């Protein structure tokens, strides 16, 4: 009896202790991982809030002030974004993607915050066209180093099963920033002047991005890094695959269209005699609607094949623009804002998801670096073309908007020729086989 008692006392209590320790360690690891994932989403949200929401959707609010003060045309005032991205994208787009794949997103996001603040302060107080272009180069550098590219890679490294939802939540930052910035800018401009308002937005953006980016972890664990390496596809194989070019051309069409509308929307509203406050509300409403689009499309991207989600987004963008060509009726501009905003919300978010499905996570930074170069060219050139096509005599965008509708539909055609990727298993076999 003593031996049996001793046996139970010595062995049985130890076994549950070991199980409890293992269970506790697993729970701690899971809790830490979930906490880190939450921080990653918050960081990406705020980076996109400032870099894209402020840096891209905020600047057009000031275009009419710049045109009036400097006697510039619509083509000239929208050319800054084109010059900046045409210089920066080819030189730094692929480099930034390579740096993110090698060193992680953290340092690049901090650098992007500094570049954005420099751009806003410079654009606020420089008066020559040459300096206008120089500081738009800084704005483009902020976009490349601190915007969608590092955020896409950061989220893709930390999320697997719910990557679409995570990307959708993070991309709410663009809509939130774009919705808030016209209201903040209008308020600051009414208190001070547009110069101080623009510079203040740049300083605010810096303090939104830099501190939170400082504490992010680039990678969740060696296990996930190894998993990403297994999924990787050599960049040479990607560049030889037709699917890469279909994705790039399709995204260029849609991004160029939303870029053209986004850069000209306030100028279009000024032709309709909207006040500064009314125009700010419409611009804000477009970006608020994009929040719905990002959540909806992110949810759909995890539910159905992402090719069909991408096609849906591109068709929504194409179907929204005809509302701008219709005669005025009650609520017309707000109906446009809702439809276009939903398409806008999903447009940028769906591209990295498709790229990850087609080409794997290891090469995502480099793949998106190249695609973002192409998209940046389209996004910057289309507003200038729209400015050239604007009829000064009749104050009409009819020709330009009609061309944008055709281009948006063309983008949908390119995407229709993509295969249906198996988003749950990785697509290296597809890339290698050229399916």
Image: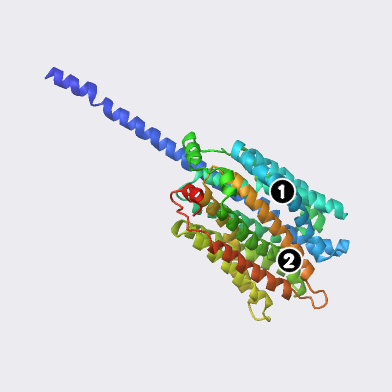
In-front residue for pair 225/268: 225
In-front residue for pair 174/415: 415
The N terminus sits in image quarter: top left
In screen coordinates, is 333 left or right of 166? Answer: right
Q: Label 2's element?
A: helix
Badge number at residue 128: none
Report, in whole angstroms, how far the alpha carbon at label 1 lies from the one at label 2: 25 Å
Residue at which label 1 appears: 90
Residue 234 shows in the view? yes
Q: Horizontal and vertical percent for residue 435?
A: 49, 55
| Residue drawn at point x = 35 percent, y = 32 percent | 22
Q: Residue 198 sits in which quadrant?
A: bottom right
Looking at this view, name the residue that lies furthest to the left. Answer: 1
Q: Horizontal and vertical percent for residue 377?
A: 71, 56
Q: Label 1's element?
A: helix
Q: Horizontal and vertical percent for residue 27?
A: 40, 37
Residue at which label 2 appears: 264
| Residue drawn at point x = 73 percent, y = 50 percent | 140
Q: Residue 323 sits in which quadrant?
A: bottom right
In screen coordinates, is 339 left or right of 264? Answer: left
Q: Residues within 10 Å of mark 2 (few under 14, many from 20)?
A: many
């Amino acid at each position: 009896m003593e031996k049996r008692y001793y046996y139970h006392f010595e062995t049985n209590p130890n076994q549950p202790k070991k199980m409890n320790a293992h269970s506790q360690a697993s729970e701690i690891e899971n809790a830490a991982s979930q906490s880190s994932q939450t921080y990653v989403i918050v960081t990406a949200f705020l980076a996109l809030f400032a870099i894209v929401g402020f840096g891209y959707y905020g600047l057009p609010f000031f275009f009419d002030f710049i045109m009036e003060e400097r006697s510039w045309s619509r083509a000239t005032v929208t050319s800054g974004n084109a010059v900046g991205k045409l210089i920066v994208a080819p030189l730094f787009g692929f480099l930034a993607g390579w740096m993110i794949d090698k060193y992680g997103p953290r340092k690049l996001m901090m650098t992007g915050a500094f570049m954005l603040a420099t751009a806003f302060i410079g654009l606020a107080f420089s008066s020559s066209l040459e300096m206008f272009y120089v500081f738009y180069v800084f704005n483009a550098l902020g976009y490349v180093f601190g915007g969608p590219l590092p955020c896409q890679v950061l989220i893709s490294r930390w999320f697997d099963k719910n990557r679409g939802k995570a990307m959708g939540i993070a991309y709410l930052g663009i809509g939130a920033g774009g919705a808030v910035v016209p209201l903040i800018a209008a308020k600051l401009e009414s208190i001070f002047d547009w110069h101080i308002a623009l510079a203040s937005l740049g300083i605010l953006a810096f303090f939104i991005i830099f501190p939170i980016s400082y504490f992010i972890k680039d990678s969740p664990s060696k296990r996930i890094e190894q998993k990403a390496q297994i999924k990787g596809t050599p960049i040479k194989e990607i560049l030889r695959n037709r699917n890469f070019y279909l994705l790039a051309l399709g995204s260029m069409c849609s991004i160029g269209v939303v870029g053209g509308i986004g850069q000209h929307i306030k100028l279009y509203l000024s032709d309709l005699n909207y006040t500064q406050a009314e125009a700010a509300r419409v611009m804000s409403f477009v970006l608020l609607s994009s929040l719905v689009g990002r959540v909806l499309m992110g949810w759909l991207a995890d539910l159905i094949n992402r090719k069909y989600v991408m096609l849906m987004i591109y068709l929504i963008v194409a179907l929204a623009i005809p509302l701008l060509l219709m005669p005025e009726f009650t609520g017309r501009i707000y109906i446009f804002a809702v439809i276009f905003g939903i398409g806008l919300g999903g447009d940028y978010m769906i591209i990295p998801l498709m790229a990850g499905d087609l080409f794997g996570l290891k090469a995502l930074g480099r793949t998106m670096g190249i695609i973002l170069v192409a998209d940046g060219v389209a996004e910057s050139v289309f507003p200038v073309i729209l400015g050239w096509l604007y009829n000064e005599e009749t104050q009409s965008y009819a020709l330009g908007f009609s061309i944008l509708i055709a281009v948006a539909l063309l983008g949908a055609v390119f995407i229709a020729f993509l295969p249906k990727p198996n988003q749950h298993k990785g697509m290296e076999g597809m890339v290698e086989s050229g399916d």
